[in-house]
Image (tube, rainbow, N blue to C red):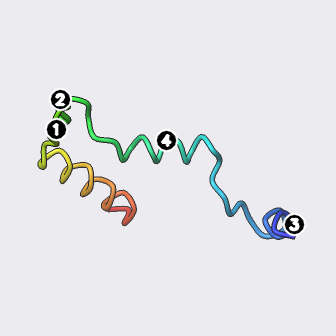
Amino acid sequence: RLREISIEHANLYPSYYQVQQAKKDCYLPIEAIRITDTFVEINLQALLDVTVHRMLKVLDI
């Protein structure tokens, strides 16, 4: 039934590739993360930049 509704009305679900790309867009750059045996450190500015970028993209600004 769900498939029938999707086919009849619209393309409601993104492709798996689009989901993968959106997920990659949420990752921090590798240079913003520091990992050792005892701790993980994340650059807060990089985290803020990624968060704001994603919010603006969703709001289409």
Question: What residue did someone put label 3 on?
Answer: 4
Mark 2: amino acid? Thr
* 10 Å crowding of disc 3: few (<14), some (14-19), many (20+): few
Mark 2 or mark 3: name the one nearer the start of the chain. 3
Query: Regarding mark 4 in the picture, which secondary structure is present there?
Result: helix
Q: Nearer the viewer, mark 3 or mark 1?
A: 1
View extreme (front): residue = 38
Q: Is residue 16 left or right of residue 43?
A: right
The answer to whether the residue labelled 2 contacts the one labelled 1, judged by CB atoms less than 8 Å apart, is yes
Question: What residue did someone put label 2 on?
Answer: 36
Mark 4 or mark 2: name the one nearer the start of the chain. 4
Whole-Å distance between the Cαs marked 4 and 2?
28 Å
Query: Regarding mark 3 in the picture, which secondary structure is present there?
Result: helix
The answer to whether residue 57 is above or below residue 15 is below
Counting from the top left corner in percent of width and height, residue 54 is at 33, 55
The answer to whether the residue labelled 3 contacts the one labelled 1, judged by CB atoms less than 8 Å apart, is no
Whole-Å distance between the Cαs marked 4 and 1?
28 Å
Question: What residue did someone put label 1 on?
Answer: 39
Q: Nearer the viewer, mark 4 or mark 1?
A: 1
